Amino acid sequence: MCGPHLKCDCTFGGINLWGKVQMVDAIGFPTFKVRMVPVGADLKVQQLTSLGFPNSCGKWQMVDAIGFPDFKVQLVSVGEDFTIIYDNNFPGLGYPPN
């Protein structure tokens, strides 16, 4: 483990934490529940445009259901699987630093 929740290979529950991501609510069957934090996040996320390549840890290309997401994320304030912070310069595992 590279922190309290994520594996050092940038997976959670055997699922890669990069790729096409759809933001959903509780009834959208989220793969993960995440909480945004200002510092000390488990994962630093870079949001990519439709032209980006989500091919490494923390790179998320936001899509809708038509975009065939790799996983679905629900933002929560409690009961999260792991925490995230948006970081367009240094995506990847959070604390401890990658």
Image (cartoon, rainbow, N blue to C red):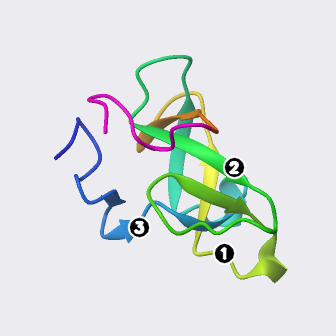
Q: Are marks 2 and 3 in contact (CB under 8 Å)?
A: no
* Residue 33 visible here: yes
Q: The residue tagged with tag 1: helix, strand or loop?
A: loop
The image quadrant that residue 28 belongs to is bottom right
Residue type for callout 3: Asn
Chief secondary structure of the magenta portion: loop
The answer for how far apart the CA atoms under marks 1 and 3 are is 12 Å
Residue type for callout 1: Pro
Q: Are marks 1 and 2 in contact (CB under 8 Å)?
A: no
Residue type for callout 2: Gln
The answer for how far apart the CA atoms under marks 1 and 2 are is 14 Å
Residue position for label 2:
47
* Residue 80 visible here: no
Image position of 2 with respect to 41: above or below: below
**Is disc 3 surrounded by few (<14), some (14 to 19) or many (20+) residues within 10 Å?**
some
Instruction: Indicate which disc, 2 or 3, sits on the residue closer to the N terminus.
Output: 3
Task: Return the residue nearer the eye: 98 or 6.
Answer: 98
Residue position for label 1:
69
Going by the picture, which residue comes out furthest to the left? Answer: 1
Residue position for label 3:
16
